[in-house]
Image (tube, rainbow, N blue to C red):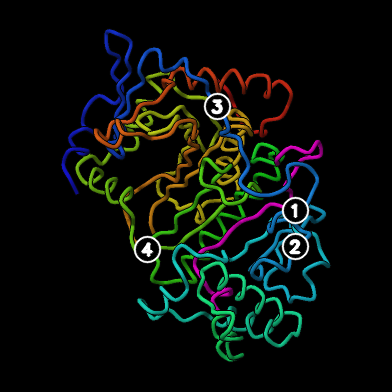
Amino acid sequence: MDDRPLDAAMREPITLMRDGTVKQVNPLSGTEVWTVPGRANRPLVARGSGAVAEGPPGRGVPCAFCLDRLEEVPPEKARLIRADRGFRTLTALPPEELRTTTPEFRRLPNLFEIVSFDYWRGNHGHEPGAAAHAHHEAWLASPLGRGILADLLRARDRAGGGVDPAAGERPAPEREARSLAFFAGGHDLIVPRRHLTEDGQLAAAGSLTPAAHAAYIRFTVQTLGHLYAEIPAARYVATFQNWLAPAGASFDHLHKQLVAIDEHGDQVGRELTRLAGRPHLYADHLAYARRQGLVLAENAHAVAFAGFGHRYPTLEVWAKDTTARPFEMTVAQVDGVSDLVHAMHLATGAEIPSNEEWHHRPIDVDQPMPWRVELKWRMSTLAGFEGGTRIFVTTITPWDLRDRALDALRPLAAAGALGPSVELP
C-alpha cells in the first residue's frame, strides 16, 4: 500500500483555486480529481455514449435476459413473482415450471463467471450445500433440464474456444459434473423482467416504480447474504450494476451483478487502513458533505449527496446505520436506501451510462462501515494525463452536480414520481 494516497486523504477534501479550478481528494480512497474551468462546457453525454450493448433497438428479437429466452440462461436460483400484497419468492424451480409464472426479477448464475466455481473448489475446497445438489439432481433427472444444461455448456465452450468440433461431445458424466457450477457458483445476476418500456425505450432503473425498485434492491440484498452463507471462504461480495455499453454492460437489459471474492479488495483495504487512524472517518466525510451543501435528499434511514473525489461525477447514498450490513438491516432500512437510489437514477436519466457500486462492511470486519451506494456517471474516457499523473479530470464540480440533480428531482417530486420517504432540501 503506497503512502501517497493516504497523505492525500488528509488534505482538505475540496479546494477552490483562484482561477476557478476545483481540486478534490476522496478521504476514503485518496483519489485526486480536478475540475478545470472551460472543460465543464463539454457535452454532458458524449457522442455515442448511449449506445446499447446488445438487444433490440425497437420491438425486435429480445436478448438472452428476456423472458422469450428463459431456456438460454443458467437455471434460476430464485425468482420474484407478483402476489396479492407485493412479491413472492420462488426457489429452485424445475425446468418444466419456468413458464408457469411470470418472474418480475430473477436470480441467475452468470454463464461466464468472473470468479468461477472451479476457483472456489480448487483453491478452497468448496463443496455445494444440500439444496444446491438437490436442485442440480432434479434438473439432471429431467430430459428438458438435461438438454438445457448441455446446451449451456456447449455455448460456454464455444465462446471460450475450448472445444474442437471434430472431437465430438464430452462424455455425459463429465457434462453432468461440470453443470453443477450453475447451481453453486459465486457470481449471480439479478435481472428485472423488462428490456423495454411501453413506449419502446430501454427500461432503466428509473423506469421501475419506487415499489418495484425496492423489491429489486431487497432481492439483491438477500442474494448478497445468501452468497456469504453459501461460500464460506468468501471475504467480500462485490455488488454492482453497469448501465449501457460505455459503462461495461454486455447487455442493455437492466441487471445487477454479485461476485464473491476471497479478498477484501483494494478499496476496502484502503478504508480499513484509514479507519484505524481516524475512527470518525465516515461521520467526518458525511458531515463535510453537509457543510458543503451537497445533500440532495434524505429520509429516516439514508442520505443522498453529490460526491467528491471520484474519477467520474458520482451521486452517493449512505445508510445512516453504520453497523449493519445490508442483509442485516430491517425492511424499512433497506427500502429507505432504495428510495434514494431510485431517486438518484431518476435524476441521472436513462441516457447517461453509469455504474452503480455498492460498498458494505465485509463479513470478517468488526469496525463500523456504512452501506453506501455510488452512482457514477461514465461521461468521459480516461486518457494519458490521468494515467501519467493519477489525477483525474472531470467536467462538473460537486456543486454543479448537486444543482443538475436537484433541478431534475424537484419536478419529479411534484409529479409524485419519487419514493414516499424522499425529502428534498
Quarter occupied by residue 180 = bottom right
Identity of the residue drawn at 33% across and 54% down: 265
Left or right, residue 207 beside residue 184? right
Q: Secondary structure at mark 2?
A: helix
Within 10 Å of the Cα at label 3, are there few (<14), some (14-19), or many (20+) other Cα atoms? Answer: some
Identity of the residue drawn at 77% across and 42% down: 58
Is there a contact, CB below 8 Å, between mark 2 and mark 3? no
Mark 4 and mark 2: span between their CA atoms? 34 Å
Q: Which residue is mark 1?
A: 62
Is 184 included in the stretch rendered in magenta? yes
Is there a contact, CB below 8 Å, between mark 4 and mark 3? no
Q: Amino acid at mark 1?
A: Pro
Read off the magenta span.
179-202
Q: Is residue 300 above or below residue 113?
A: above
Q: Total marks drawn?
A: 4
Q: Which residue is mark 4?
A: 235
Indicate the position of residue 85 as horizontal and vertical percent values: 78, 52
Q: Amino acid at mark 4?
A: Arg
Q: Nearer the viewer, residue 263 or 80?
A: 263
Mark 4 and mark 3: span between their CA atoms? 37 Å
Q: Which residue is mark 3?
A: 45
Q: Which is nearer the N-term, disc 4 or disc 2?
A: 2
Identity of the residue drawn at 56% across and 51% down: 330
Q: Which is nearer the N-term, disc 1 or disc 3?
A: 3
Image mark for residue 69? 2
Quadrant including the C terminus: top right
